[in-house]
Image (cartoon, rainbow, N blue to C red):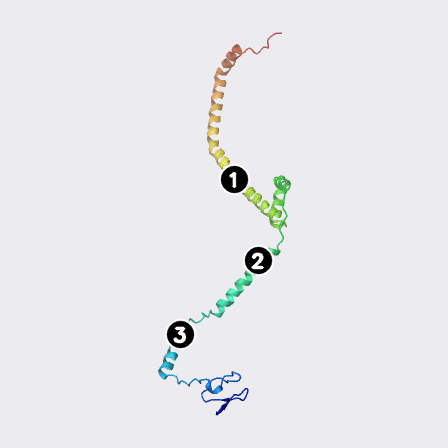
Amino acid sequence: MANTCMKCGTGLRDGAAFCTQCGTRVASAIPSRPAVNPDPAQQRSRRAVSQTTQRITPQPIQRPVSQTVSQTAVSSARHEGTQRTAKKPAAQIVGTGAFFGFLFLFSIPVIGWLICIMMAFTHKNPNVRHFSRAILIWLIIAMIISFLVGLAINALIQSATPYIEQITAAGTEELNGLIESGSLNEILSEIEKLLPLSAPAR
């Protein structure tokens, strides 16, 4: 018995795998794995496969620094615009009576027009500003149309004036001729006979 149990010290037979007293496995009975030398051809194939995998693996796309900076600036500008829109207070609602009063005020010929111009550019409420600008545009359109209609009427009168003068001159000459010939007195006497001038007796 060359070997002894490491745990209880009992003598072991040659080639025994376990201690007959305590059942402990004998260390010499554990098979040891022989060192396997790798094949050089296998190592080369593994290296080639790893290099091919590295080549095939897509590399991350690197964007230019300018593009990244511009995208950051755009996103920050959008964020600031959103914050400004959120912080901007809502405009006060203008009622129907106020708009009716503005219409009455703007209908005054000169003073109302001046007030309309001032309110179209200086009023704090955007609704009133837009309404004043709309009325101002209508006033400008009405003034232009009135000016064009006035020019057309003036041109018509100027073109019709010679014909009116000719008709008037011809009528005057004919009347003078009747007066000189005495025919006018005869016409008046005939009219008096047909229409008696004396009022009927009651």
**Residue indicated by mark 3:** 53
Name the outermost residue toward the front: 21
Determine whether the residue tagged by mark 3 lies in a helix, strand or loop. helix
Q: Judge whether 50 appears above or below 144 on screen.
A: below
Q: Position of residue 104 (x, y in %)?
A: 63, 39
Pointers 1 and 3 in contact (C-beta within 8 Å):
no
Pointers 2 and 3 in contact (CB under 8 A)?
no
Q: Which mark is residue 17?
A: none
User: Which corner quadrant of the image does residue 61 belong to?
Assistant: bottom left
Where is the C terminus found, in terms of image quarters?
Answer: top right
Q: Residue at x 47, y 32 (%)?
A: 160
Q: Nearer the viewer, residue 80 or 9?
A: 9
Considering every residue shown, the one lying at the far bottom of the view is 2
Q: Amino acid at mark 1?
A: Ile
Q: Is 181 left or right of 198, judged from the image as shown?
A: left
What's the residue type where badge 3 is placed?
Thr
- Which residue occupies the foreground of this view, 194 or 175? 194
Q: Nearer the viewer, residue 135 or 108?
A: 135
Indicate the position of residue 186 as horizontal and vertical percent values: 50, 13
Between marks 1 and 3, how big is the CA–CA gap? 82 Å
Residue 69 as seen in the image, left or right of residue 120: left
Label 1 neighbour load within 10 Å: few <14, some 14-19, many 20+:
few
* Dot 1 or dot 3, earlier in sequence: 3
The structure residue drawn at horizontal position 62% and vertical position 47%, both measured from the top left corner, is: 119
Q: Which residue is mark 2?
A: 82
Q: Give neighbour class at mark 2: few <14, some 14-19, many 20+ (Cα, 10 Å).
A: few
Q: Which residue is mark 1?
A: 145
Q: Is residue 69 left or right of residue 46?
A: right
Mark nearest the camera among 2 and 1 is 2
Picture coordinates of residue 17, whole percent (x, y): 47, 84
